Image (tube, helix red, strand yellow):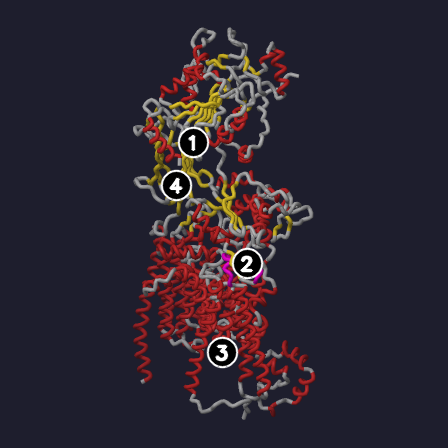
């Protein structure tokens, strides 16, 4: 008869308990959803209902078109204002899932006579889907452990900053819906695998299709599921359930994924998708072998069969390799390589390396994004080892792979976050289970030897136990530390329970506080509008970007072409509605390099490039006055590097450094730097602002030269209030066919050097 | 496209008992004989119906693949759709087969044969939807 | 832009009934020392054509040329070789800005002084010799001084009438650096040179002047005497090395052979060209559409067949109207995205006056393309036209749908579906039977 640490009421009917449990579950899920949504609304509260950052502006623009003109127009949309003059076949180069989702919501709401602005749908889509993510994480974790772990996981994913960073209100990006799809596809997969149901396999395929339509990160699923299947096969866990689940997922999912124009034939043509195909083939072979084996018992035949299976597997593998070699299957792309070799991108594809979210993750950001979950995560993974059902293997593989990728690239932190939440929830829930469970172990069953050994050296004991003893739960760890290493595990007394539970509760509270703080301070800035705090502590909104974009919209001809670094392409298109040369969709390296070259060359060299591309205005971001560090001078080296990649003879990165190898903008800056268009545009008339005193660049913290740069081929058209955005107009060619530098000198009345006639013959001496 | 089919056809080429390689060693011949016998004895008519369907799909897939390799693969999407429908239907049917096979009863505790058939029908309908969408 | 301006000018011209395509008001700026009547033939010629001449001296400020940023005169003649500095509104910068506003200029250089106009000349790629070195030629033998030279005009020149007798010239020659906008009208005779007249006493003078200048000899037919210049705005400028070319005296002066000189006609030709009477072209209309259609499309699809039509008119100074003009044989059309993807000749259509048309197939490349016509011939108005059209890939329903090559696949897919239906039917019927069997068994 087990003793109880505290008594539970016993006069409650089991049905009542069950009912209350499900009610509490539903209420908790609803509250979690509410928390998930409302914590993402900081951005709207602190600023306004506005689309954030860069990519969302394009998505928003595309969605507006979709809502206005319908799906087929959107499908066939050719955007002549992007990538001028190449244009962009938008329908075939995007993942339309996000826009289609908003479009459907928009149409449904309008069909219900709810005239909601499309912008508000876009702004609030990500928070809305975060609630769904919480729900799907709950379902996923429920499959792994039980409902309470599921609720914990849902709560974690609802407010964890690692996910909030990509899903605050206004962050209208593919990731907003993709994480939900990711989790739900995985849930369907686990479910299909557990039950061997083709229904869940089909469901997984459908959500996989949705995921493919929504985010390029679908390749993660494409490789995770085969990896899991392969691991199961290698562990000798092949079963008909695996066959059913995988086959139905792959056959339908692959065919479905090819419906997305951007993906096209890739699933059968590129190496990234070959793993899935290979595992599919392998499964067929094994399934067939199993079938035959079930009908025949001849030993010899089985040997033969295994030999032939292995041979076929090898032939298939070499077939794929050979086809890759012959070019039938595209080899891995650069982005893929950069996942393995972090230095690869910097060397060969600066355009990818230049994106800040492609940088390796800094260690503090793990803590910043995951807080205490990062400590619970390994514990959860180890617990998965202790059970090691098929779905636990999945979580283990997922954790390992995602941890690696998250370390390589900041943006892939997003794929790590769900599994961290799941694993942490499993760990925490086991802990709580152990400590809330009122059952006390029976003290008589303590084996004397162990009881003697433990109090003296509990730490050593646990160390020993960890590798050898296959600990079944975190509770066991704790119980070992507290000296209760009994076979029937449990905790004695109520005090121990209260201490641990109180600690856990405290951790959770800190977690919530941390999440709220990070969300409101770090991740809610729209980056289109900046906030600063004045000397008196009052918040001050810096709205230079929109000021400049609206200036462009109001004051330039509608067909004007605006050149800027590609970061601002989507914003110019979205807010100023003007044609851009390059934008955030970095599909054409040469075109971006052209812009880089124009920015990093001298005026005379840049002018023909500008003319050739019909550039009317150039927009740059300059933070020197305000101390805004994300400006173009700080990005300038990337422009140089990308241009150098295409024109290594004309642009050389070392020329932009001083002899000592410093990156300077002051007197000691090298001439190449000082003559570059970007430098001149940034600091043009900057000196005048300081009224005779020496100008000071607040970002670089350097004193500017006394004599500011001059411009001959450009006219300053607009400079925003805080000088963050500066717009220059490209001059027309001189009406007399002169070089603009000379024409400018003439305009200013400077004496011209007397030209001499071309020498035709020498005078006789 | 070739890799997909290579994996699939290979496994197509073998399961048909009639189409088993002639050049196998004598022991294998015996084994084949016993395999056939065992098959005939142990398989219920419903499974045989499934097997007949599977054989049909296999032949259809092989023919399409041969046409693609030997004649033209030009409307590649049509090839993928046609071939994919064969392969997809094949694996779905094979799934059904393993689910309703009484020998696998213990593996599929949650799935009754009726449920399996409903799953199969749903999966197939979804599959055919995508096939026709992709075909033209 | 060009079209609009041309249309506005046309309206102006029609009401004013002038001979120029750009307007009839002329401001003549003269040196105080210059005798206006000595050029009466020239003035009379202009007045006869219908120009309103307004005279003012170089130092006067009234009437203003530019008021409130608007040019008050369509043409400005500056015959002021003696004035070193001109009035405020005639600075080099102001004159260039006049060109920007479409005003035509006829400018006389000074052989003796470094005047404003001489300074300005260098902006037009003209290179003047040092002051005080006029053109000298001792051939052919004549009773005039060596600085008064009869010059034979080129035989065929777009600006000048054909068969023009030699022209008397006295003034400064100039060299020029290559500039596609420059149109040399009158070149110096091969045996002439520029030198200091006071010490002109033979070969030594030639040598000395060459030596002094230090950069070779200012001599020969590579020097120019009268040169036209057409700014990118279409405004025309003519620099004349010596103002006397337009004088009554030279018009009446007999040539050494005893014939009358060509000066009168030459002056008329030069003024006519400068004031955009002659060789003035314009593009009236640009049309493009798909073959067998009439309306232009907002965007074209790759591999469309497209017809491009250009309507060109030429100004007729006699009738004072714009008339359709089919005389251009070498017009070209480019279909450009960064680089020309298609470059084809744009021939005149026989039977349709002023129409130039060509049909071509749009390249198999999507992007923002431009129809570019860029016809620049020396002496003629530049014809430039750019029309932007996006070229898009076919829509999803514009690709060929059912291909014969794909029939096996269609059959395959359909047979699979049919077999599936059949299978389901068989299965369900079998299911019934089995169910019954099962039922029997359970019973």
Which of pointers 4 and 1 lies earlier in the amino acid sequence?
1
Could you say which disc has been placed on residue A357 in the image? Answer: 2
Give the overall secondary structure of the magenta segment.
Answer: loop
Question: At which x and y percent is residue C297?
Answer: 34, 43
Give above or below for A496 relative to C123: below
Label 1 Cα crowd, 10 Å radius (few <14 / some 14-19 / many 20+): some
Question: Going 61% across and 16% down the picture, which residue do you hit?
Answer: C209
Q: Which residue is mark 4?
A: C362
Chain that bears disc 2:
A
Tell me where residue A184 appears, x and y as whole percent: 45, 68
Magenta residues? A524-536
- Which sits in the foreground, A661 or A45? A45
> Which chain letter goes with mark 3?
A
Checking the image for residue A438, the label placed there is none
- The answer, for residue A243, to whether it is visible in the render is no
Q: Separation of disc 3 and disc 4 at Cα? A: 65 Å
**In the rendered view, would you say C337 is above or below A517?**
above
Marks 4 and 1 belong to one chain: yes
Q: Which residue is mark 3?
A: A148
The mark lying in front, picked from 3 and 1, is 1
Read off the chain for label 4.
C
Q: Secondary structure at mark 3?
A: helix
Is residue C49 depicted above or below A99 in this figure?
above
* Same-subunit check for callouts 3 and 4: no
């Amino acid at each position: 008869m087990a003793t109880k640490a505290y008594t539970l009421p016993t006069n409650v009917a089991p049905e009542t308990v069950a009912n209350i449990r499900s009610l509490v579950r539903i209420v908790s899920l609803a509250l979690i959803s509410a928390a998930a949504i409302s914590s993402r609304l900081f951005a709207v509260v602190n600023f306004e209902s506005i689309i954030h950052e860069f990519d969302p502006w394009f998505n928003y623009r595309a969605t507006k078109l979709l809502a206005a003109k319908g799906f087929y127009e959107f499908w066939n949309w050719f955007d002549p204002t992007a990538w001028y003059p190449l244009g962009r076949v938008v329908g075939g180069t995007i993942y339309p899932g996000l826009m289609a989702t908003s479009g459907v919501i928009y149409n449904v709401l309008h069909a219900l006579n709810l005239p909601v602005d499309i912008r508000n749908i876009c702004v609030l889509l990500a928070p809305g889907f975060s609630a769904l993510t919480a729900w799907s994480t709950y379902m996923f974790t429920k499959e792994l452990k039980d409902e309470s772990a599921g609720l914990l996981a849902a709560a974690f994913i609802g407010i964890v900053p690692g996910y909030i960073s990509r899903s605050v209100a206004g962050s209208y990006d593919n990731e907003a819906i993709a994480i939900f799809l990711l989790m739900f596809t995985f849930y369907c997969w686990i479910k299909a695998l557990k039950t061997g149901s083709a229904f869940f396999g089909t469901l997984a395929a459908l959500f996989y299709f949705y995921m493919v339509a929504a985010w390029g990160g679908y390749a993660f699923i494409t490789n995770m599921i085969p990896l899991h299947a392969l691991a199961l096969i290698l562990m000798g866990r092949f079963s008909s359930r695996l066959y059913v689940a995988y086959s139905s997922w792959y056959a339908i999912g692959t065919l479905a994924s090819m419906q997305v124009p951007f993906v096209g034939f890739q699933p059968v043509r590129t190496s990234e998708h070959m793993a899935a195909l290979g595992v599919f083939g392998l499964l067929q072979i094994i399934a067939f072998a199993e079938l035959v084996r079930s009908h025949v018992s001849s030993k010899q035949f089985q040997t033969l069969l295994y030999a032939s299976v292995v041979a076929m597997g090898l032939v298939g593998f070499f077939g794929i390799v050979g086809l890759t070699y012959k070019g039938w299957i595209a080899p891995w792309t650069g982005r893929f390589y950069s996942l393995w070799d972090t230095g690869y991108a910097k060397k060969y594809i600066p355009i990818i390396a230049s994106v800040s979210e492609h940088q390796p993750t800094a260690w503090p950001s793990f803590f910043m994004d995951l807080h205490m979950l990062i400590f619970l995560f390994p514990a959860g993974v180890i617990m998965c080892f202790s059970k090691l059902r098929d779905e636990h293997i999945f979580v283990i593989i997922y954790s390992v792979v995602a941890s690696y990728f998250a370390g390589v690239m900041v943006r892939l932190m997003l794929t790590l976050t769900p599994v961290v939440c799941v694993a942490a929830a499993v760990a925490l829930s086991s802990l709580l289970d152990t400590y809330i469970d009122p059952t006390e172990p029976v003290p008589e069953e303590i084996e004397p030897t162990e009881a003697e050994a433990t109090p003296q050296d509990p730490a050593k004991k646990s160390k020993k136990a960890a590798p050898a003893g296959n600990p079944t739960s975190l509770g066991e760890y704790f119980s070992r530390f507290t000296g209760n290493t009994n076979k029937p595990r449990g905790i004695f007394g109520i005090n121990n329970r209260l201490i641990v539970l109180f600690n856990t509760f405290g951790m959770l509270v800190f977690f919530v506080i941390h999440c709220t703080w990070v969300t409101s301070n770090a991740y809610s800035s729209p980056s289109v509008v900046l906030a600063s705090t004045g000397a008196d502590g009052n918040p001050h909104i810096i709205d230079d970007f929109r000021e400049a974009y609206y200036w462009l919209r109001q004051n330039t001809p509608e067909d004007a072409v605006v050149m800027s670094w590609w970061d601002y392409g989507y914003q110019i298109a979205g807010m100023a509605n003007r044609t851009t040369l390059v934008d955030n969709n970095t599909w054409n390296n040469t075109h971006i390099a052209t812009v880089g070259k124009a920015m990093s060359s001298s005026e005379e060299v840049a002018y023909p490039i500008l003319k050739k591309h019909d550039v009317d205005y150039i927009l740059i971001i300059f933070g020197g006055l305000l101390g805004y560090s994300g400006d173009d001078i700080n990005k300038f080296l990337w422009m140089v590097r990308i241009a150098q990649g295409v024109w290594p003879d004309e642009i050389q990165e070392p020329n932009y450094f001083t002899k000592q190898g410093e990156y300077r903008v002051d007197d000691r800056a090298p001439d190449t730097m000082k003559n570059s268009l970007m430098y001149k545009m940034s600091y043009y008339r900057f000196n005048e602002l300081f009224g005779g005193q020496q100008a000071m660049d607040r970002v670089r913290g350097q004193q500017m030269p006394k004599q500011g740069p001059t411009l001959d081929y450009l006219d300053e058209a607009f400079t925003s209030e805080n000088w963050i955005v500066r717009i220059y107009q490209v001059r027309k060619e001189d009406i007399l066919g002169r070089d603009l530098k000379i024409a400018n000198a003439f305009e200013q009345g400077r004496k011209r050097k007397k030209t001499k006639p071309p020498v035709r013959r020498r005078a006789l001496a | 496209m070739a890799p997909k089919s290579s994996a699939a056809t290979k496994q197509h080429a073998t399961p048909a008992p009639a189409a088993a390689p002639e050049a196998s060693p004598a022991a294998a011949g015996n084994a084949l004989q016993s395999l056939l016998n065992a098959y005939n004895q142990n398989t219920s008519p419903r499974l045989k119906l499934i097997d007949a369907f599977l054989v049909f799909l296999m032949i259809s897939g092989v023919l399409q693949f041969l046409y693609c390799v030997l004649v033209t693969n030009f409307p590649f999407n049509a090839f993928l759709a046609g071939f994919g429908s064969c392969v997809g239907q094949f694996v779905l049917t094979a799934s059904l087969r393993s689910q309703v096979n009484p020998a696998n009863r213990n593996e599929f505790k949650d799935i009754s044969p009726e449920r399996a058939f409903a799953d199969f029908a749903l999966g197939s309908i979804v599959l055919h939807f995508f096939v026709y969408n992709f075909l033209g | 832009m060009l079209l609009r301006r041309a249309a506005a000018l046309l309206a102006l011209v029609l009401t004013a009934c002038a001979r120029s395509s750009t307007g009839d008001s002329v401001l003549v700026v003269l040196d105080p020392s210059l005798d206006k009547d000595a050029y009466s033939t020239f003035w009379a010629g202009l007045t006869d054509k219908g120009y309103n001449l307004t005279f003012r001296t170089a130092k006067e400020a009234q009437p203003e040329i530019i008021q409130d940023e608007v040019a008050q005169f369509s043409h400005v003649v500056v015959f002021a070789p003696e004035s070193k500095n001109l009035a405020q509104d005639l600075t080099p910068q102001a004159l260039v800005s006049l060109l920007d506003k479409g005003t035509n200029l006829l400018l006389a250089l000074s052989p003796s002084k470094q005047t404003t106009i001489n300074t300005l000349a260098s902006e037009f790629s003209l290179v003047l010799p040092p002051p005080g070195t006029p053109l000298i030629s001792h051939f052919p033998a004549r009773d005039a001084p060596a600085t008064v030279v009869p010059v034979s005009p080129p035989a065929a020149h777009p600006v000048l009438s054909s068969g023009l007798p030699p022209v008397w010239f006295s003034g400064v020659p100039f060299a020029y650096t290559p500039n596609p906008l420059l149109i040399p009208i009158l070149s110096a005779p091969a045996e002439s040179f520029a030198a200091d007249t006071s010490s002109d006493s033979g070969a030594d003078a030639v040598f000395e002047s060459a030596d002094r200048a230090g950069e070779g000899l200012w001599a020969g037919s590579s020097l120019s005497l009268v040169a036209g210049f057409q700014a990118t705005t279409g405004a025309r400028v003519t620099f004349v090395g010596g103002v006397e070319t337009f004088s009554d005296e030279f018009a009446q002066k007999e040539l050494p052979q005893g014939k009358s000189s060509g000066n009168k006609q030459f002056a008329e030709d030069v003024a006519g060209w400068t004031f955009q009477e002659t060789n003035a072209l314009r593009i009236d209309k640009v049309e493009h559409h798909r073959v067998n259609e009439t309306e232009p499309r907002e965007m074209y699809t790759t591999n469309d067949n497209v017809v491009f039509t250009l309507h060109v008119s030429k100004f007729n100074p006699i009738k004072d109207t714009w008339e359709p003009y089919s005389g251009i044989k070498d017009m070209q059309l480019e279909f450009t995205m960064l680089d020309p993807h298609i470059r084809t000749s744009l021939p005149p259509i026989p039977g349709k006056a002023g129409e130039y048309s060509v049909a071509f197939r749009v390249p198999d490349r999507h992007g923002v393309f431009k129809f570019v016509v860029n016809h620049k011939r020396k002496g003629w108005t530049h014809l430039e036209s750019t029309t932007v059209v996006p070229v898009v890939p076919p829509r999803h329903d514009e690709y060929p749908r059912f291909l014969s090559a794909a029939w096996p696949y269609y059959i395959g897919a359909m047979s699979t579906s049919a077999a599936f239906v059949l299978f389901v039917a068989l299965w369900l019927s079998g299911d019934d039977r089995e169910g019954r069997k099962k039922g029997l068994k359970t019973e």
